[in-house]
Image (spheres, helix red, strand yellow):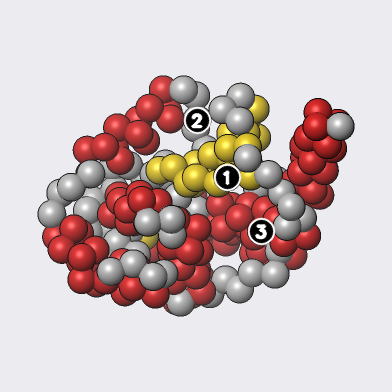
Amino acid sequence: MIKLDILSDPICPWCYIGKARLDRALEARPDHPFEIEWHPFQLNPEMPREGVERRTYMEAKFGGKEGAVRAYRPVVDHAEDAGLELNLDRIERTPNTLDAHRLIHWAGLEGRQTAVVSGLFRAYFREGCDIGDAGVLADLAGEAGLDREMVARLLAGDGDRAEIAARDAHARERGVSAVPTFVLANTYVLSGAQPTETWLKIIDELVSQKKENTA
């Protein structure tokens, strides 16, 4: 197996699109060699713990309502092309995602990371849920096969908050400034929501190399 590390934030629309494109490639190549691990990167590490009202956040970030609309037009177009449903009008708050990243970390210990990541993207972009809310996160954990009550207890404390923040900071120190960022075999870095065709080419080359090496 070849390690594929993915730095992502569950409120990043390009991360959602990038995952969908990668998923298409993995479905088309079930013999892919990837062992996938998700890593934390907060788009807004200074976000208040309770989050902020989304319209206020978007207009401040993009210079008003028209700027926000312009910024998200390509996101909507690419999401539709990837077969994703975005219901941006349902999103009322932009959350602090540190607790969501804690949940992703705990899910990794149980082998349920990708299921949790998928649930977070769906909850935020399709259902408009506040994924900074502990109750929402606990429900998503339960849906992904984790112990809901245990996760609720963990979220009530500060366990692994410092570790997640340190991993985020470490990524920035290594030069990561945007997500999604994909690191292949701890060596090759791909930034941005790569097309499915790119992933298919990479997988085919890796599988071909493996066959040559074992021939």
Please give left or right for residue 199 compared with residue 96 in the image.
right
Quarter-wise, where is residue 131 in the image?
bottom left
Comparing labels 2 and 3, the label whose residue is closer to the camera: 3
**Circle 3: residue type:** Asp
Comparing labels 2 and 1, the label whose residue is closer to the camera: 1
Q: Position of residue 31 (x, y in %)?
A: 74, 52
**Circle 1: residue type:** Glu
Q: Position of residue 143 (x, y in %)?
A: 39, 75
Give the number of the disc on residue 5: none
Secondary structure found at label 1: strand
Q: Quadrant of the N terminus?
A: top right
Give the number of the disc on residue 35: 1
> Which residue is identified by label 2?
176
Q: Nearer the viewer, residue 84 or 200?
A: 200
Residue displayed at 30% across by 40% down: 164
> Which residue is identified by label 3?
23
Residue displayed at 15% across by 63% down: 153
Q: In which quarter of the image is the C terminus?
A: top right
Point out the tag, 2 or 3, that comes first from the N-terminus: 3
Residue 29 visible in the snapshot: yes
Placement of 145 over or under 73, stated as above or below: below
* Proximity of marks 2 and 1: CB atoms separated by less than 8 Å: no
Please give left or right for residue 74 compared with residue 135 in the image.
right
Q: Which of 66 and 110 is in front in this view?
A: 110
Point out the tag, 2 or 1, that comes first from the N-terminus: 1
Q: Position of residue 72 (x, y in %)?
A: 59, 59
Point out the tag, 3 or 1, that comes first from the N-terminus: 3
Which residue appears farthest toward the front when viewing the image?
215
